[in-house]
Each structure stands twice: as C-alpha cells, then as structure tokens.
Amino acid sequence: MELDYDLAKLRRLKIPALLAVIFLISFSIVYLSHGPRLADPDGWHYYRYVRWIVEDGRLPDHDPLQYYPTGSNPRGDNIIHTYFIGYIYRLIQPLGVPLMPYLMAIEAVVGGGMASVCLYYAVRELFGRRVGLLSAFLYSFAPLMLTRVYSGSIDKEVTYGLFVFTSLYFFLRGYKGGIDLRAPKSLFNPALGGIFFGLGVASWSGVDYILLAISAAAAVHFLFVRDRELMKSILVMGIVGSLAMFLVSPPRYTLAYFAGHLQTVVPLAVAFFPLLALWASDELKRRGRDISPIYTFMASLVLALLLLFLLGFGPKVRYLASIAIGFLSLGKGVRADLYMATVAESQPVSFLGGGNTSMERILSGDLFRNLHLMLFIIPIGCLILLLRFLEDKKNFTHIFALVWVSSGLLAAAQGMRLMFFLAPSAVTVVAFTFITFYKKYREEEKGLLGAVNSGAKTKARYKAEERLGTVRLALVLVPILLLLTSLSTMNYAVAMMAPRQSDLPPPWLDALLWTNANTPEDSVILFWWDYGYYFQAVAERRTVADGGGNVPRNIDLAKMFTSPEDEAMAYIRKYVDYTKVPTYMVVSYEEFGKSGAINRIAGGNSSNTSLIVGDGQLYIATFSVPKGKSREEDDRRIGEIFQRNNIATYYIVDMGSAYQIWAMVQVDEQGNYHPEWSEKLLVKLLPFNNGLGQGLKHFKLVYPSTGNKFSYVYIYRVQ
C-alpha cells in the first residue's frame, strides 16, 4: 500500500518536474546573451523607470530628460512591466543582488521560463496535457520567441507571454465552464482573463493581439454555431480588460482611446452583436416569428452603423475599417509608415529567400531561419485541424488554432518584429501534429495487437501482423522526427543567442561617460533619434528625441541633417536656444548606414506626418575596393573611380584587405551635378574629406578632443 502511495505521489509530481525542466531550458537559452550591461536602447529607457520604482516606489509624473523642453509623463507610457520588474527587485534587494545582473536575468526568468510554463496551461485547455507540454518545450527555445526575448533587453515583450498565455488560459476555462449571471462565481475565470489581458496591454499594446485572434475565431465560429457562452466570455474579458487598463493608467486609456482602437472595438462588437442577435431571435420566436439569428445579427449591425454615421462617427468607422482591410491585405502596416518603414525590425519578412530552386528559396527565407523543420510540420498540422473542424464545426478549439496561426502569419508579414506573434501558435500546431500522429499510431497498435493475439489463424490476423510492423516503425519514426526537429531548432537558438553577449558598444560607452563628465548638467543633446535613451540613462542629459516614436521631432531632425548649416539652425532653435542653454550635437559612424532613413524621413511634414513630399536629397552610397600591391596603386585606382563617377565628397576606411568607401552622390537622375549637396549638415559633421566641422560657424568638435578622423562617435558644441 505504501509503495502504491509513493508511486501515485511520484506520478503527481511528473508534470511539475517536466515544467521545471522546460523552465530551466528556456531560462538557460535566453540567458546565454547576458553581459555586463543592457545593450538594447529601449532597455536603457526602462532601466530608468525601474530605478525610479526601486528608489521611490513609483514613477514620477514628469521626466525632464525626455523631449526637451517640454519633458514627458512616464505614467502615460506602458508601465506595468516596469512596475513588475521593479517590485520584484525590491523584494530581493535585501539579498544584495546588484540591479544590473538582476536585469540581465529577469528577461530569462519571465520572458523565457515563466512564459513557457504559462503556455503549457493555455494549450492544455485547448488540446490536453501532452500537447501542452510539448508546446511549452518547443516554445522554450523557439527562435521566433528569441527575436524579442533575450538577456540584455528589458523591453515591453518581457511580460508578453506571462500575461497573454495566462489570460488565454482563464478565458478558455471560463468558456468551458459557462457563464450564468445567477452564479457570480461563473464570472471568475473570464474576469481573471480580462484582468491579465488588461495588465498585459498596459505593459505592451501588442498583447491585445490575442483578444483579436479570439474574436476573429469567434466570428467564424458564429457562422456555424450560436455559442452564447463563447460570446459572453469574450464580452466579460473585453469589459474587465478595458476597466483594468483604465484603472492602471487613466491618462493613457481614455474613452477616446477605447473608441479609436480596433483592438478594443472589435472584441466588444464581436461579442455584443451576436448576443443581441440571439436575444432578438429568441424574442421573435417567442412571438411566433422564426427568424434566423444571422438575419437579426445583420440587421443589428446595419442599424448600429447607420446610427454611428448619423451621430458623426462615420470617419472613425471608415478609419477602423481601413486598418482592418489594410492589415488583411498587407497594404497598411508598419511598412507603410514614414517613420517605422525605416526601422530595421519593421522591415518586411522574406518568406522566400534567394536561390535557383523552390527549396533553396524556402531554406534561405526568414521563416525557415526562425522555424527550421517546424516550418514543414505546420502545413500538415493546419490540414489536420481543418479536417477536424469540418468533421465537428461545434468545436471552437480547432477553428481558434487555425485563426491563431493564420493571424500570426499575417502579423509576421507586416514586419520582422511582429514575427514574435507567430511563435506560440506555431509551436502549438507543431506539438498538436506530433501528438496526433503518435496517438493515432498508438491506438492503431493496440487494435492490431488485439487482432494478432486473438489466436485465430485468419486472413485478418495475417493482415494485422503485416500492418503492425508498419505501425511500429511509424511509432519509432515520429519520436525520431520530433527529436531531429527539436535538436535542429535548439542548435540554431543556441548559435543565435551565444554570440550576443549584451553590452553597450565600447565607443558609445566612452562617449556617454565623457558626456556625463564633461558637459554641464543642464545641457541638451541633439542626435539622430536612435541614441536618446543612451544619453538619458548613462549620460544623464536632456535630449530632444529618442526611440519613443515622436515622429514630428524625428522629421525635424531629418530636415536639420539634410539642410545646409544656416537652414539647419532654424530646426535646432525650434527646440532649444543654444545661445542660452549648453547644446551639443552628436553624430556617429552609424549615420553613414542610416543616411537612407534620414533622407526618407526628411521628406515628411512635422505638422502633417502623413504628408510625404520628396526626400532630403542626401544620397550616400558605399562600395569597397580590394587592396593592391602598394598604397600608390590603390590611391590611383580609387582616384580613377572617383573621377569616372563624379565623386568629390568621400570617406575612406581601411578594412584590412580592402577599402570601405562612403561616397556622396551629387549627380541627379538627369545627370546634373550638385556641389551644394555636399554642404548638408550631416555631411559636414561626419568624417568626410570636407567634414568634421570644416567651414561650419556654429559647431565646434569637442570629442574626440584630438579630432581623430577615424573615431566612431563625434560630439560638437553648438555655439
């Protein structure tokens, strides 16, 4: 009896033990990229937030270092994940753990390990424990997840999995349990789902994707099944989630916000109108008129739209509709945005890469790079889910899984950063596929063994014996294929994370520390927007722009860099009186590569960011020239290239075996030469042959103090 009790106890510990292993795998892989300091600029932004919370217990209502001269209100930002990180640190601070090493580990703990465990519970509600465990295991090292979750960043995605998967778990439990207003306890699970959803959105607006996926699946489900419990669960989750968002950050989540965002309007509409249609249909039936809920749904929707147009909300309705249509058609996304289209992580995903054959193109594409062998399993899983759905249209699980992975693919198509959304649904479909095949063959094996062991020497028995060998081979091959899939993906994940070694690049760290030690505390620093959070957190200086996405300021900075000095000063004076306030301008070697983005954004209008007219006429090209036998020969060949291509403005970098040359293109499409293009401010500040401040009246190079042409970061005093 005691042995039986011990065995039962061990069996109960099996799932927690497996989850602990999954947690450790995910933690270890995410933590591979840790280093001495945060590397991601956004991470330094939230580092300041965490420090405020650790030191003062809350965020201030004014940040003077951001968006000089107005400053900003940190409480209007996505703040929940910083409170989450900050208060956990306050709990362990008495143990003597320094803040920076803690920040290096928290991403691996929450974004990696905890998220993987939470995914298990969500998927368990969909497909059972086995699929849940395998999904969590695959997610723990999925490269799609690691594109946004890695040590060295405490960006908003750190709590994504924790909040999204937990809210999905409680939503599914609430839906399965049903909602009865006469039993308030039945509201517990969907309300908890709403709370986690609201907290997640207040941490990162990308969390609202999950409720959109649920709503889209519910809309399709409604065409086949009039499922009141599903709609009620969505309605409760949507209302409670919106309330949680408002309570967390009233300045950010106003009534105008909820009315103007597709992510909040769609779930409430998807839940409310079907429930209204079902109620109307029931009432009509009670009065002797049998009208399908589909017709009452369409009628209520048309009446609602007419009412909105009559009340003057027509433009808002058209705007929301255009967003939805654009997202589905891939015609309106981050790529179409003037500002986001220049950000590397918002570039379109290449589903197919280069190559001569279809297989070569698939293997060189972004999807295979981030999914590996799982890419070939997903279509099989989707086909199985579709067949299951066609067999049983009343089962919400299958249609939700299909919509979840399809919407993940749509999100990925919008930009590299959004590939992250595909991670949980992709691994769930892969896990479902493997478990489905394994269960199928295991059940078939049991049936065949029954026929083989029947004792009768019949034709059926001989056929069963033949089939049994094939089935047992399949039972061996399925785990082997799973092992190969897992190992190849994990190997890529380790190779992807290990070289990162998070840290601030040494040239930037030196420049930031110099700024902190050698500029007045009330200084204002100007630069291309990417570096703002560095200067706020490390140099502790006021800045005009940063990575917060203030598009009008970024447009003005782009126009400043693409204008000659006298015109550029007007854009500087718009934000800071450099005659009264110590002002510095920072450029770096990176602006050579970013000049295309600066040029594009310079065509924008800071008063109307949707208006784009031309560009900044800043055309910087790069090419390399292999080294020859002597420097004299190299100079002659480079000179000939310059002469043939009318290149008068250039910067030559000795790369060892070749010369990297950055050249200003000064010939337009009609063949006209423009000497004035070399007078643009960015050109004069960078280390071109006519740069490093040569001829400028308002800029004095102060770092590096030697005026070293081959430095990486250059700092000028504006005077």
Image: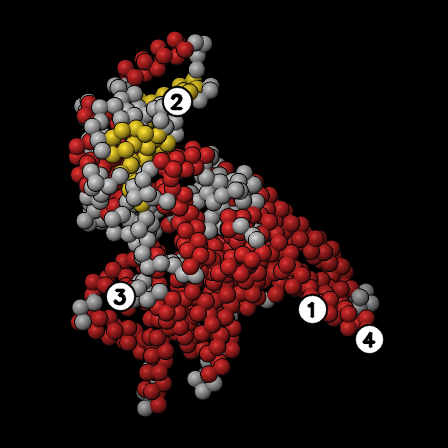
Residue 238 seen in this snapshot: no
Depth order, front residue of 164/564: 564
Q: What residue type is disc 1 on?
A: Arg
- To which residue does mark 2 refer? 653
Q: Earlier in the sequence, mark 4 or mark 3?
A: 4
**Is residue 689 found left or right of 171 in the rendered image?**
left
User: For mark 4, what is the residue?
Assistant: 1
Name the element at disc 4: loop
What residue is pinned by disc 1? Answer: 12
* Residue 539 in sight from this viewpoint: yes
Numbered circle sitting on residue 256: 3
Q: Residue 328's spot in the image, x, y percent? A: 35, 56
Q: Amino acid at mark 2?
A: Val
Mark 3 is on which residue type?
A: Ala
**Sequence-earlier tag: 3 or 2:** 3
Instruction: First in sequence, mark 2 or 4: give its number.
Output: 4
Q: Secondary structure at mark 1?
A: helix
Mark 3 / mark 1, whichever is N-terminal: 1
